[in-house]
Image: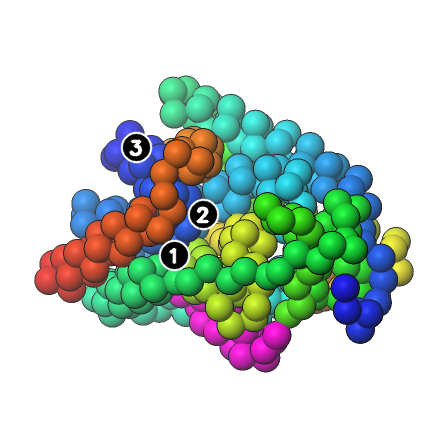
Amino acid sequence: MTAFILGAAAVTSTIGVLGGLGGAMLLVPALVLAGMPVSEAAPLGLLTAAAGSVAAGPRHLTERLVNHRLGLTIELAATTGAVGGALVSGLVPERPLVLVLAGVALAAALVGGGRKVVRNPAQPDLGPEHVGERVGALGGAYMTRFGVAPYNVKRVPAGLALVTLSGVVAGIAGASGGFIKTPVLSELMNIPTRVAAATTTFTIGITSSAALVIFALQGRLDTRTGAAAVLGGLLGALTGARLQAHLSAIKVRRALSVVLVVVAVVLVVSS
Amino acid sequence: MKRDTPGPFPSRFIGRRQAVGLTILATGATLAAAVAMVAPGTAGIWAGAVAVGLTMAAPLLRVGWLTVRWLQEGDLRFAAAGAALLAIITLGAILAA
């Protein structure tokens, strides 16, 4: 089983990075279909998500894409949801958990297949020294092909409400919630896609760790299988990052959406 | 650039320090996880615990570090956000224990 977890975590993490939906969204259903209860698979999914966040962090930081202030602001809502979800998930029977997981997979398929790309115009009076987040504010600036483009955050209360939901999903189903956070940041809150993806990757690690602390204290974290999930997640995230430059993100995301619909159907039928 | 947001852009140094720290933690977690996969008995269990512990701790250490940096920069609002986040996680741990 440990070898299967390692292989599944590596493959799903690679695909998750390519498609921008997160590896846990595929790993947890794969483990459930292999016979593992959701209550045991969810912590492994979150470990994979946290490992991917740690692996991707250095590159995003070097490119100055992460907006830590924005990330921490939305994390206040997401982590509250994740802690609450993790606390109650141990009390929920298996079948409803499987149905929640199937619903989450279907939602991820719909969201992933329909995402648009938000573009912010570059400003000629801004230079590389302006790239990054701003002290005391949620906005910032990022580097585009045409120069440095500033961005300001919109619809913060609505965004916070939706990321709370992503946290609950993480706590109950073990999916990182990135498939909710990234579109909320880019489509609703007016954040450029690259900044949204990097900031989400940063926040996924925090949400996952918050829920994992609860799972560890509840005795639901096995160190051997956990290590397999960590190793697979780290290797998969690094592989996916290398392949990203060679594959179309939109095509991968649409293929992933089809897979997630199939996964949702299989989960419902098998439960 | 709109002038309705205060403050300058943060220094490049913050990103590099975080990147180095994350790379060290990721390397440690990878090595520990690899040992856990092959080492028998108690050694494998402890190596697994180290791998899982480092992976869980890295994001939370990042939050703590950012909170301290923002406090030093005088950005009290976001330092308070970081401290509140750590308090929420601590409360959850107390409730779960």
| Residue A192 placement, left or right of A111 | right
**How would you classify the magenta stretch by its main secondary structure?**
helix
Chain-order first, disc 3 or disc 1 = 3
Q: Nearer the viewer, residue A67 or A2?
A: A67
Residue A229 lies, in percent from the top left, at 39, 38
Residue appearing at x 35%, y 68% in the figure: A91
Chain-order first, disc 2 or disc 3 = 3
Residue appearing at x 26%, y 34% in the figure: A4
- Is the residue A48 above or below the residue A234 in the image? below
Q: Is residue A68 visible in the rendered structure shown here?
A: no
Q: Decide: marks 2, 1 in contact (CB < 8 A)?
A: yes
Q: Nearer the viewer, residue B97 or A251?
A: A251
Residue A121 lies, in percent from the top left, at 62, 60
Which residue, given by chain and number where applicable, does mark 1 sit on? Answer: A175
Q: Secondary structure at mark 2?
A: helix
Chain-order first, disc 2 or disc 1 = 2
Label 1: how many residues lie within 10 Å, few (<14), some (14-19) or many (20+)?
A: many
Q: Nearer the viewer, residue B13 or A141?
A: A141
Amino acid type at mark 2: Ala
Amino acid type at mark 3: Gly
Q: Nearer the viewer, residue A201 or B43?
A: A201
Magenta residues (range) = A154-172
Q: Secondary structure at mark 1?
A: loop
From this viewpoint, which residue is outermost toward the top? B39
From this viewpoint, which residue is outermost toward the left? A269
Label 3: how many residues lie within 10 Å, few (<14), some (14-19) or many (20+)?
A: some
Which residue, given by chain and number where applicable, does mark 2 sit on? Answer: A49
Which residue, given by chain and number where applicable, does mark 3 sit on? Answer: A7
